[in-house]
Image (spheres, rainbow, N blue to C red):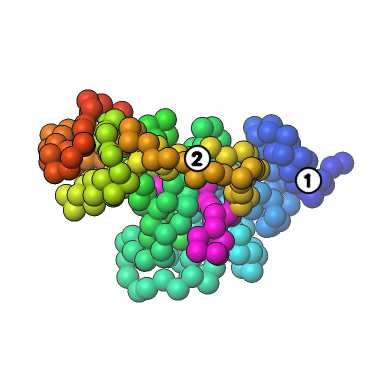
Amino acid sequence: MARGIDWNERGNKLERAGRLAEAEAAYEKALRLTPRRPSAWYNLGLLYKRTRRWGDSLRCNLRAAELEPSNEAAWWNLGIAATALGDWKQARRAWSRFGVPIPEGEGPIELHLGAVPIRLNPDARAEVVWCQRIDPARAVISNVPLPESGHRYHDLVLHDGAPTGYREVDGRKVPVFDALALLQASTHATFRVAVEAPAEGDIDALQEALTDADMAGEDWTASVRHVCEACSHGTPHEHAPVTPGVWLRSRDLGVAAESEAEAEGALAKWAAAGKGRAVGRLARVVEAGSRN
């Protein structure tokens, strides 16, 4: 007769094979036979995290942490699930038990944890963008993501805590985390526009003007970089020597703004302020989120 530990191992193998429904059933069988096995509770909670069943993930990770208080991974995944659900009391408890210094208070956690790269849509058409991390599992997008991502500048995203690659910044490695869910859509829509910029300084001036007006601009001609799978999930490196190119005056830009009129006004003002500058037709490519 199979034991609880056997069903737990069977669940692991099924999950690695992508047979998630069967893995779930195996973990549940393990828990019926050995209900105080923390590893089975943790594994089931991890599976629920993978499938975004946050209530179930919270329940299982909480039980795993209660049975094995030293299980840091269970506390971490409990914090992620609680954050996804907006259960701030449980989230604060989980992060504190993990060892993250959390200030006294109630409600959402507002920290300043610095810039971090987040991989949007990690399972398909992934894009790595820079974000401002505001707590251990939430970050606000700082770039203007490509329209294919479906995300916007200033979206609030839930992210995992296990690094899935690194980026080098000023000679140091910064971990990349995978996005898990969109928590709050930005009120900024994304617009695409072609511009003529005679010099690199013209693009710098445009980005500064947009930022000053509570908008954002992204020079997709310069910032979009396609890397191989190994580079994306490791530390990107050049596959061949890169020869500095000549400045291309025709640029493809992403603009984040709350209204088309605001974006058009800022672009027109920029074009009028410099010789040789020109702006093409503005196209809305990602809708803004609700203002409620």
> Helix, strand, or loop for circle 1?
helix
Question: In front here: 291 or 164?
Answer: 164
44 up-or-down from 121: above or below: below
Total numbered badges shown on the rendered structure: 2
Tell me where residue 133 appears, x and y as whole percent: 41, 58
Tell me where residue 53 appears, x and y as whole percent: 51, 41
Tell me the quarter of the picture where residue 47 sits: top right
Q: Residue drawn 62% across and 38% down?
A: 228
Question: In front here: 8 or 135?
Answer: 135
Marks 1/2: CA–CA distance = 41 Å
Q: Residue drawn 30% across and 44% down?
A: 199
Q: Residue drawn 54% across and 32% down?
A: 124
> Helix, strand, or loop for circle 2?
loop
What span is colored magenta in the figure? 155-178
Label 2 is placed on what type of residue?
Arg
Q: Which residue is mark 2?
A: 225
Residue 136 located within the stretch drawn in magenta: no
Question: In front here: 168 or 268?
Answer: 268
Q: In the image, which disc is placed on residue 9?
A: 1
Mark 1: few/some/many CA within 10 Å (<14, 14-19, 20+): some
Mark closer to the observer (1, 2): 2
